[in-house]
Amino acid sequence: MEMIMRFVIFLAVFVCPVVPLISTPYSPDFHFSILEEQPIGTYVGRIQGTACPTNKIYSLFPASTPFAINQNGGITTTQLLDREKSSIYRLMVQEKCGGTTVYFTVYISILDVNDNAPIFFKSHDETLLSVNSPVGTIVYTSIAYDVDTGVNSQIQYSLQQLDPPLFAINPYTGMITLSAPMNADFRSRTLTIIATDGGIPPLSNKMTLQIHITVP
Ligand SMILES: [Ca+2]
Ligand SMILES: [Ca+2]
């Protein structure tokens, strides 16, 4: 008998679905997206509620979000949006008409604009290189990052070349190598390294590298 009672309790607690005591009004999710940095007042999307066709009153929560809702259910921006600070917002919209109140969950995704140039970890650096180094010697690896996303954050590296070119850079890794033999007269050289992102239009940044050529 005790085993049967335990089995009944198990079914009640772990197997049977929980049935809410109070049913809630139908409240589907809405998903909108908007590019960052659009002018204040840009239209985001419209709630199409189900409570009743006319005389609706909309409210948006929390009130601190950078969005507003009009009485047609249209959501607009109230601030410039920065995807690099917040890439998605979750809002609650309350729709009232007559004695009925419905709540909707609204997700607004902020899409990327290429508004950030790559940034080098160091704007200037120095390194040593023996004058006897063979061609192909790794001289330095430059590293930059970009806080945008997708192609807007994909970086390619290049050099403002010396004349004649003495160094080469891997566009994807930023690794700089010696590309021509040096002679004993070679002394310190300064390279300008450029990081350019894949945005349209692209943005870029520079750093300088002082290469001290040493003679044994
Ligand atoms: Ca961006
Ligand atoms: Ca960028």
Image (spheres, rainbow, N blue to C red):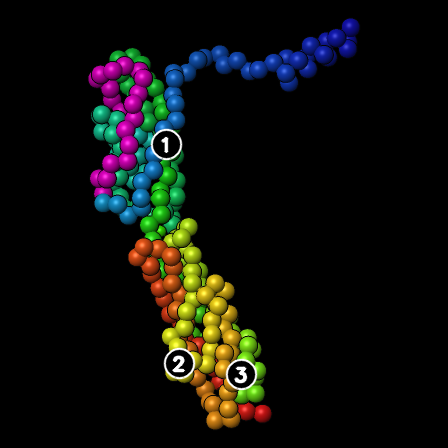
The residue singled out by tag 1 in the image is: 31
Q: Is residue 45 magenta?
A: yes
Q: Which callout, 1 or 2, points to the residue nearer the camera?
A: 2
Q: Residues within 10 Å of mark 1 (few under 14, many from 20)?
A: some
Residue 103 drawn at (x, y percent): 36, 22
- Compare residues 1 and 185 and report the one nearer the observer: 185
Q: Which callout, 1 or 3, points to the residue nearer the camera?
A: 3
Q: Give the extent of the magenta segment.
A: 40-58
The disc labelled 2 sits on which kind of residue?
Leu
Identify the element where label 2 is drawn: loop
- Above/below status of 117 relative to 90: below
Residue 132 drawn at (x, y percent): 57, 87
Q: Can residue 191 be seen in the rendering of this structure?
A: yes
Q: Is residue 78 magenta?
A: no
Q: Earlier in the sequence, mark 2 or mark 3?
A: 3
Q: Earlier in the sequence, mark 1 or mark 3?
A: 1
From the Cβ of disc 1, is ligand 1 less than 8 Å away?
no
Q: CA distance from mark 1 to mark 3?
A: 56 Å
- Residue at (37%, 39%) from the top-left corner? 109
Quadrant of res 133: bottom right
What is the number of the mark on residue 129? Answer: 3
Identify the element where label 3 is drawn: strand
Residue 105 drawn at (x, y percent): 38, 28
The disc labelled 1 sits on which kind of residue?
His
Quadrant of res 64: top left
Residue 81 drawn at (x, y percent): 31, 45
Q: Earlier in the sequence, mark 1 or mark 2?
A: 1
User: In the image, is 198 to the left or to the right of 131?
Assistant: left
The residue singled out by tag 2 in the image is: 162
Q: CA distance from mark 2 to mark 3?
A: 16 Å
